[in-house]
Amino acid sequence: MFSKWSFDELKQFVQYKAAARGVRVILVDPPYTSQCCSQCLYVARENRKSQSEFECCQCHYTAHADINAALVIQLLGQCQPAYGGEIRCVKSQLQALAIQARVS
């Protein structure tokens, strides 16, 4: 059923269902979330050892890649003003590290 949906349709569906139940949806920009370490925020393509393996080149944290990316997305979501977090916290650090990763 879901395989034929575009991401925009899925987003609209989730927002509609969440609003009907009084649940807040916080959107997070996904670039580099799969390359960012959820523990030290180091961003590098080399952190992804395979499709499913994540190992940080800086702090050596290891986890399933999807779980690590989900933790990064959670951190970014908690930094959104709508969540009550400080926008400068993880989001700005991740953006700076992503720029660094693109340059190197």
Image (tube, helix red, strand yellow):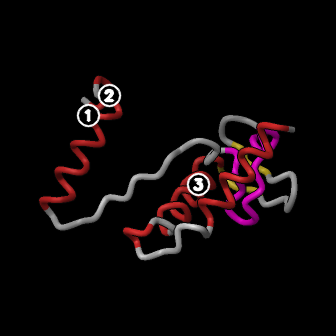
Residue under label 1, please give it. Answer: 9
Q: Is residue 82 left or right of residue 103?
A: left
Picture quarter with the C terminus: top right
Residue under label 3, please give it. Answer: 67
SS label for mark 3: helix
Q: Is residue 87 left or right of residue 94?
A: left
Mark 3 surroundings: few (<14), some (14-19) or many (≥20) residues within 10 A: some
Dividing the picture into quarters, in which one does residue 53 lie? top right
Asked if labels 2 and 1 touch by Cβ distance under 8 angstroms, the answer is: yes
Between the C-alphas of marks 2 and 3, the distance is 23 Å
Which of pointers 3 and 1 indicates the residue nearer the eye?
A: 1
SS label for mark 2: loop
Residue appearing at x 37%, y 68% in the figure: 82
Question: Residue 74 magenta-drawn?
Answer: no
Range of residues picked out in magenta: 35-49
Residue under label 2, please give it. Answer: 6
Asked if labels 1 and 3 touch by Cβ distance under 8 angstroms, the answer is: no
Is 46 placed above or below 61 here?
Answer: above
Q: Amino acid at mark 3?
A: Ile
Q: Amino acid at mark 1?
A: Glu
Between the C-alphas of marks 1 and 2, the distance is 5 Å
Mark 1 surroundings: few (<14), some (14-19) or many (≥20) residues within 10 A: few
